[in-house]
Every structure is written in structure tokens, then in C-alpha cells.
Image: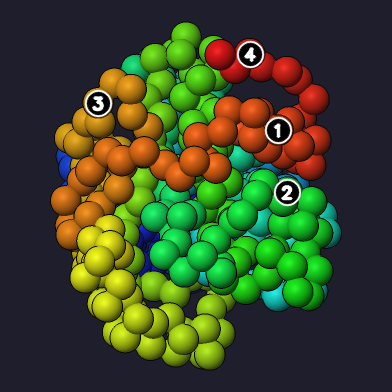
Amino acid sequence: MTGATSGVGAYALGNFLKRPRTRVIVGERRPHRYSPTRAGVLPLELGSLASVRAFADAVKRQLGEQHIDILVLNAGLHGSAADERSAEGYGLTFAVNHLAHFLLARLRLPHMALQRRLVITSSNIHDPPMKRIAPKSLDIAEWAHPTPNGSGVGIRSYTASKLCNLMTALSFSRLEEAKALGIRVIAFNPGLTGGSSGRDASALQVLLVRIMMRTIFPVIGLFRPEFVMNMAEHSGKMLTDVALGMIEPPADRVYVSLVKGKPTFPDPSELARDRQGQDRLWRESEAMVGLHSEPAIA
């Protein structure tokens, strides 16, 4: 599991650990500062693809002959500046929210147990009500190498990364390898919560998020119920239920979105559903993370 140290993820982890005979392995940048009872903590810096590979190898060593039942990819940034880059030189939000999780899922998918679950946290903000911050096209080059006034910085980098998360989940659901293992792939939208402002959020970012949550989104929620605030604790429980199969989407659905605290199964945005776009994102992401295989996607 990634993103288990605060907000929705921390509540979800607590719920997992309440279950008897449950083993959880958490990736964390500062493992020496974080030691939840009964959870194994391994170092993971999502801003470094080398660290992602090392984490994947460490998980494999710890599990031995055992397989992964549930892979939850929940961590993320809420936006970054154009000059904030990953270890490999990619835009930091794109690298942390998308590339790292894409690579981790690809590396660990062959080691998942049959008929189990891959859950990627996305967001309804992939199709936001404020069209100015919405991704208008699949501008992968800009997101990977952001320019000061482009769509790969600030809140726009976040909405773009959540679109990538959703498209990645849709691609994994079509992957022949995942189908052969019977893996249920889900993109989970926890809704807007006030529980966390994301990894390394500045004081200004925290303040801006809180102001928007208390002023703009309550008004938007009157017309777009999917933007009504959810409590982080409740969204964490819903994430747990989705991961454990207690919330089961219809067979032809991948996207689970909390609306007024209840799970719904809407269509993603038109851009997210574009299969040619999904395939292009997959291919270009492969090249960026150094994977060169061509797995079959139906």
C-alpha cells in the first residue's frame, strides 16, 4: 500500500489492521518515523523510479513464495511547480502520482494472487467543474516536462495526474495478464475530503485547499453532488471496503466514485474513456519508466 500515512489512506490502513491475520506492507519515505502496529514499513520514495524498483524487490523478498492479495496505490501530490522534478527529471506530480504507481503495478502484477484486487486512487477532479483547470487533451509531454504556464503545474498537474490514474486503471482492466489472473481493477474516487492536503504540501497550499473546501465546493455541490465534501474517515472505510470486495462494482465498471458518501459507478470523462489515448499513455509511460515489453491489451 502507498499513501497510508495520512488522510484517507491512514484510515484505510487502520481498518485493514483491525482484521485478524492480515499482513500489510506499506511504502513510506521516512520509515524510521512511521511504525504502525502490525504493518511492515519499507522505504519508498515515489519521486524516484529506482526507489520504486527497490521497493518492489523488497516486497518480493519479504513475501517469499506468498502472493499479494490486494495492491492499493493511494499516495499523491496535490500539485507542484514547473521546476519541481523527480530524480529522473520528470514533473514531480506526474512522476509521483502516475509514473511511480504505473511502474509499481507493472512490477508486482505477476506476483498477485488469483482473483484479487488492484485499487488505484483517482478523483472526480479528473473532470472538474472549473473547466479552466481541466485537462483538455492528453498532453503527456507537457505533464512529464512542465513549463511555467503549461498544464503540468499547480492544480492542473494534479487534475492531469488523476486523469492518468483513471486511464491507467482502465488499461489494466483490459490487460490480458490481469484477465488471466482474474484481477479486479478499480479506480477509486474518495471524493473531496479535508483530511489531507497531500505529500509535502506547503502552508499556502494547505490554506488554499481549506478555503476552497469551505467556500467554493459547497456551492458547486449544490449543482454537482459528486463534489459534496466527504469525511476522510468515511472515505477511508470506503477504500477499505472496495479493496476487500465488500463494495463490488458492476462487471463492466472500473470507476467507483463516492457521491455524498455513497459508492456510485459513473462513466469517467470522455477523455478518460478514449482507448487510443489510454494506449498512448501506456506506451509513453512504459518508455519513461524503462519498460520495453508489449503486453497485450484487449
**Closest to the observer: 135 or 29?**
135
As drawn, the label of residue 140 is 2
Q: CA distance from mark 2 to mark 1?
A: 9 Å
Q: Residue most toward the top? A: 180
Q: CA distance from mark 4 to mark 2?
A: 22 Å
Up/down of 256 relative to 141, above or below: above
Q: Secondary structure at mark 2?
A: helix
Q: CA distance from mark 3 to mark 4?
A: 24 Å
Q: Is residue 32 left or right of residue 87?
A: left
For image coordinates 63% across by 13% down, the residue present is 296
Residue named by callout 3: 250
- Amino acid carrying label 3: it is Pro
- Amino acid carrying label 1: it is Arg
Q: Is residue 68 left or right of residue 213?
A: right
For image coordinates 17% across by 57% down, the residue present is 261
Up/down of 144 relative to 219, above or below: above
In primary-sequence order, the first of circles 3 and 2 is: 2
- Pointer 2 and pointer 1: residues touching (CB < 8 Å)? yes
Q: CA distance from mark 3 to mark 1?
A: 27 Å
- Pointer 4 and pointer 1: residues touching (CB < 8 Å)? no
Q: Give the image location of residue 193, x and y in percent.
A: 31, 69
In primary-sequence order, the first of circles 2 and 1 is: 2
Other residues around mark 1 within 10 Å, as few (<14) / some (14–19) / many (≥20)? few
